[in-house]
Amino acid sequence: MKWTEVQEIALQLADAHPEVDPLKINFVDLMNWVIALPEFDDDPAHCGERVLEAIQQAWIDEVA
């Protein structure tokens, strides 16, 4: 899974962290959780604020 697979990342984060409110997560934790996903296989340096915002929004939409 790559950074561009925002929807899939959001789904996996929602499954892995059902107790977390995605509105309250900081970007450092979010990035670390994405990198820790078992299927994630991309360069952490390719992550930026826009990517994290997109992942956070997709996660919010998923749990809403």
Image (cartoon, grey):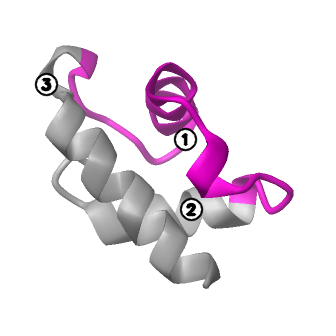
Quarter of the image where the C terminus is located:
bottom right
| Circle nearer the viewer, 1 or 3 | 3
What separation in Å lies between label 1 and label 2 (alpha carbons)? 8 Å
Query: Label 1 amino acid?
Result: Leu
Mark 1 / mark 3, whichever is N-terminal: 1
Q: What range of the chain is rendered magenta? A: 16-44
Q: Please identify the residue farthest to the front as the structure is shown.
A: 24
Please state the horizontal and vertical placement of residue 14, each as a whole percent of the image: 65, 64
Query: Is 12 displayed left or right of 1 in the figure?
Result: right
Q: Is residue 64 in sight in this rendering?
A: yes
Query: Label 2 amino acid?
Result: Gln
Q: Residues within 10 Å of mark 1 (few under 14, many from 20)?
A: some
Please state the horizontal and vertical placement of residue 41, each as a whole percent of the image: 32, 36
Q: Secondary structure at mark 3?
A: helix
Residue occupied by mark 3: 46
Q: Residue visible at 27% across and 56% down? A: 54
Q: What mark, if any, has residue 11 been given in the picture?
A: none
Tell me, yes or no, whether the two marked residues, 2 and 3, touch with CB atoms within 8 Å.
Answer: no
What separation in Å lies between label 1 and label 3 (alpha carbons)? 16 Å
Q: Is residue 1 in sight in this rendering?
A: no
Q: Quadrant of residue 63?
A: bottom right
Residue occupied by mark 2: 12
Q: Residue visible at 58% across and 54% down? A: 23
